[in-house]
Amino acid sequence: MESAELIIQQLINGISLGSIYALIALGYTMVYGIIQLINFAHGDVMMVGAYLGWFCTTRLNLPFLPALIISMALTAILGMIIERIAYKPLRNATRLAALITAIGMSFFLEYGGILVVGPQKRTFPDVFPQTVYEFGNVTFKYGDIVIILITIMLMLLLQFVIKYTRVGKAMRAVSFDKEAANLMGINVDNTISATFAIGSALAAAAGVLLGVYFNQIDPLMGIMPGLKAFVAAVLGGIGLIPGAMLGGYAMGLIEAFVSGLGFSTWRDAVAFLILIIVLIVKPSGLLGKNIREKV
């Protein structure tokens, strides 16, 4: 394969994988933008969504799209339950307490999943035609096109919700100033729950697409993609929706090119190396602005 074809092939692979990372990173950045919480259980919420999609396609024999919608809806409810039970009581606690709770919720979902569904890997069914398109030595699958299109549609839908709906306007107001939003009649608690619901639904979509992409799922599948999506959110600028999208695609492309160069065993290490570099050089991320806090 020539260098130009190799670059194009890795671009295709990177955009497909980056689409999934971007969907997960959106949940991180939305929650952080509203309540300044890094929800480390978010990757495991994605795992629950993947299992719901797997159950709908294998046990209920549903087509891909209905399975995706059901998975997103049920996982959105799970996200609201987690917020009300685990995070709402700590609304006025220190950030460290909320962070430790998020880590605890992550372990609860992981090992609760092992208890319920077992530790073994499950094969995700072939929900898309196994059509392969070839242009010279460059190949891409039908599933890659669907993953990219679904991600773009969900991102556009999210932008519409944020900019043009009452819920989205309330989310923007709460992210700017919770106290002022409350004084203006906005129900802050419901707005935060809606944020968790939307973020969890996007994570469920990412989980189903990740199952389709790698063709298998397991109860611990959310750990590494969740951490990489967190790195993507920090890279783009945590708290910024466009930053999460940019960081997700950047992370997917970097991982694809590292693997394409023959260093696939180093792709995870590169992700965390990027996190260290960003925190040292530009902690606010690519699209973030450095804002000095007043004492």
Image: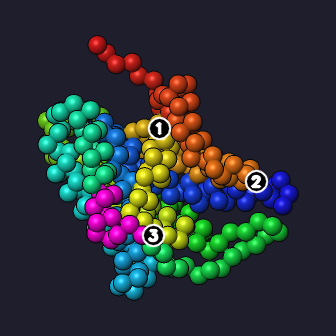
For numbered disc 2, what is the local secondary structure? Answer: helix
Q: Nearer the viewer, mark 3 or mark 1?
A: 3
Q: Which residue is mark 1?
A: 234
Q: Which mark is residue 121?
A: 3
Magenta stretch secondary structure, dominant: helix
Farthest bottom residue in view: 61
Residue 115 on the magenta segment: yes
Quarter of the picture containing the N terminus is bottom right
Identify which residue is drawn at 33% across, 71% down. 117
| 162 and 284: which is toward the camera | 284
Residues at marks 3 and 2, CA–CA distance in whole angstroms: 32 Å
Residue beneath disc 2 = 7
Which element carries disc 3, helix, strand or loop?
A: loop
| Foreground: disc 3 or disc 2 | 3
| Residue extent of the magenta highlight | 109-120
Left or right for 158, reference 105: right
User: Percent position (x, y) of residue 243?
Assistant: 49, 41
Disc tally is: 3
Question: In the rendered structure, which amino acid carries the disc numbered 3?
Answer: Lys
Q: What residue type is disc 2 on?
A: Ile
The residue drawn where x is 62% and y is 74% is 142
| Vertical side of 290 occupied by 9: above or below | below
Q: In this view of the protein, which residue sits in the foreground, 181 or 292?
A: 292
- The quadrant holding residue 115 is bottom left
The answer to which of marks 3 and 2 sits earlier in the sequence is 2
As drawn, which residue projects farthest toward the top? 295
Can residue 230 be seen at all in this image of the molecule? yes
The CA span between labels 1 and 2 is: 26 Å
The mark nearer the N terminus, 3 or 1, is 3
- Residue 15, by quadrant, is bottom right
The foreground one among 294 and 233 is 233
